Image (spheres, grey):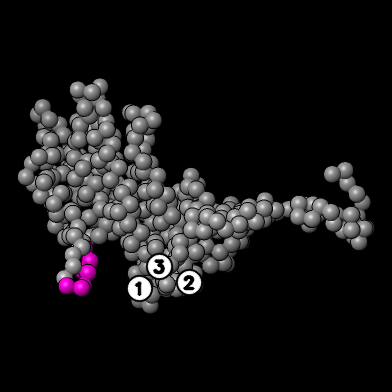
């Protein structure tokens, strides 16, 4: 993708080109991007077919060559995840960022001049970038490894192995942490480095897109939280397996704004080294791990009392023995002091 060419002004009275919303080629793009419908043949249910992503990519690029169009760019972002992976996705997010930063006044869909430059149509177009049934689903299924032994593991595979999400109902996890670490190791540093660079580039673009709306339309913009958090998760898991200096630390910085459920093992500032990627090696790691277990129960077993117990356990991480006894069995403190020959304190 030649970003400089695609983002260059089109010239004349329409620096972003004409609005192609009702153009035949644009309508063909929208049709091509739709998946086939599920259908029944006799007693057999035939699953819906995916779009021809290469065709969608070509049609979207043809639109972008004619106009600065955010709608076509979002469709392109979803398609290139299937055809070019994370590198292609990062190029698509860079284009969207460039459109907003360089051509805010003219890119399509344009602001509604008849309604005080209302940005609703533009916001709705960008919302598709965080669509759970398109981009997010594709991101979760994008290959992170290319191992001769374990194959092409995805974020979904890794999250199941790390207990961040449950396996499909009735199935056991296909991989564990050891096999995930081996798959990353078998992929090679150069490939992982390129993958991590693409993830971080896309993440920076998403943050910049949010910043444009925050500046231009304060309090009113597309919700890209889920996309940002998923990119942070990707950066963490890949960064934990890249041995380049500061790779894992940078991945932790990428994820610092995410929720505990999206946070990762290994987010503590001090690491002892030698453990498997994602291992619990510091008190802060333990707190983050407990947070993620709590989030699991709240999400998938909301009636369980386990979160109450775990919240208490998290509060006691790093506490000394007497503090733990005071919290859990205050009535037994006198016996502990007597047996240990400890003096009574003022608490």
Element marked by disc 3? loop
Marks 2 and 1 sit apart, C-alpha to C-alpha, by: 14 Å
Residue beneath the point at 39% across and 61% down: 155
Residue 325 image offset from top left, x and y in percent: 79, 55
Asked whether 316 or 93 is in front, the reply is 316
Q: Tell me if I can see residue 244 in this picture.
A: no
Image quarter of residue 34 = bottom left
Element marked by disc 1? loop
Residue 76 image offset from top left, x and y in percent: 21, 50
Within 10 Å of disc 3 (Cα), the crowding (few <14, some 14-19, many 20+) is: few
Label 3, on which residue? Answer: 168
Element marked by disc 2? loop
Within 10 Å of disc 1 (Cα), the crowding (few <14, some 14-19, many 20+) is: some
Is the C-beta separation of discs 3 and 2 under 8 Å? no
| 43 drawn magenta | yes
Q: Nearer the viewer, mark 3 or mark 2?
A: 3
Marks 1 and 3 sit apart, C-alpha to C-alpha, by: 19 Å
Magenta span: 42-48
Is the C-beta separation of discs 2 and 1 under 8 Å? no
Marks 3 and 2 sit apart, C-alpha to C-alpha, by: 15 Å
Residue beneath the point at 39% across and 30% down: 219
Which residue is most to the left?
A: 24
Label 1, on which residue? Answer: 151
Q: Compare marks 1 and 3 and give the one earlier in the sequence.
A: 1
Identify whether 274 is placed above or below 5: below
Q: Which mark is residue 176?
A: 2
| 203 drawn magenta | no
Image quarter of residue 50 = bottom left
């Amino acid at each position: 993708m030649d970003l400089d060419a695609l983002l260059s002004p089109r010239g004349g009275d329409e620096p972003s080109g004409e609005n192609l919303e009702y153009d035949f080629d644009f309508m063909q793009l929208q049709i091509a991007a739709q998946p086939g419908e599920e259908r029944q043949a006799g007693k057999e249910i035939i699953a819906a077919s995916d779009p021809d992503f290469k065709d969608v990519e070509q049609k979207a690029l043809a639109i972008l060559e004619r106009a600065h169009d955010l709608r076509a760019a979002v469709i392109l972002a979803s398609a290139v995840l299937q055809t070019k992976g994370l590198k292609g996705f990062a190029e698509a997010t860079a284009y969207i960022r460039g459109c907003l930063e360089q051509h805010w006044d003219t890119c399509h869909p344009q602001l509604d001049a008849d309604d005080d430059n209302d940005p609703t149509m533009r916001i709705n177009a960008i919302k598709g970038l965080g669509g759970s049934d398109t981009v997010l689903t594709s991101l979760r299924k994008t290959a992170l490894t290319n191992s001769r032994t374990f194959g092409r593991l995805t974020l979904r595979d890794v999250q199941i192995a790390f207990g961040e999400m449950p396996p499909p109902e009735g199935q056991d996890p296909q991989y564990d942490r050891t096999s995930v670490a081996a798959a990353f190791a078998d992929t090679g540093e150069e490939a992982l480095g390129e993958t991590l660079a693409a993830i971080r580039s896309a993440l920076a673009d998403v943050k910049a897109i949010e910043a444009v709306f925050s500046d231009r339309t304060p309090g009113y913009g597309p919700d890209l939280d889920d996309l940002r958090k998923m990119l942070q998760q990707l950066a963490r898991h890949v960064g934990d397996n890249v041995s380049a200096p500061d790779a894992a630390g940078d991945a932790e910085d990428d994820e610092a704004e995410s929720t505990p459920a999206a946070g990762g093992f290994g987010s503590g500032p001090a690491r002892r080294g030698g453990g498997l990627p994602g291992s619990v090696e510091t008190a802060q790691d333990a707190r983050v791990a407990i947070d993620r277990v709590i989030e699991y129960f709240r999400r998938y077993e909301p009636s369980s009392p386990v979160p109450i117990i775990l919240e208490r356990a998290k509060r006691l991480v790093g506490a000394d023995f007497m503090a733990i006894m005071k919290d859990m069995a205050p009535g037994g403190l006198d016996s502990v002091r007597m047996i240990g020959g400890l003096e009574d304190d003022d608490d």
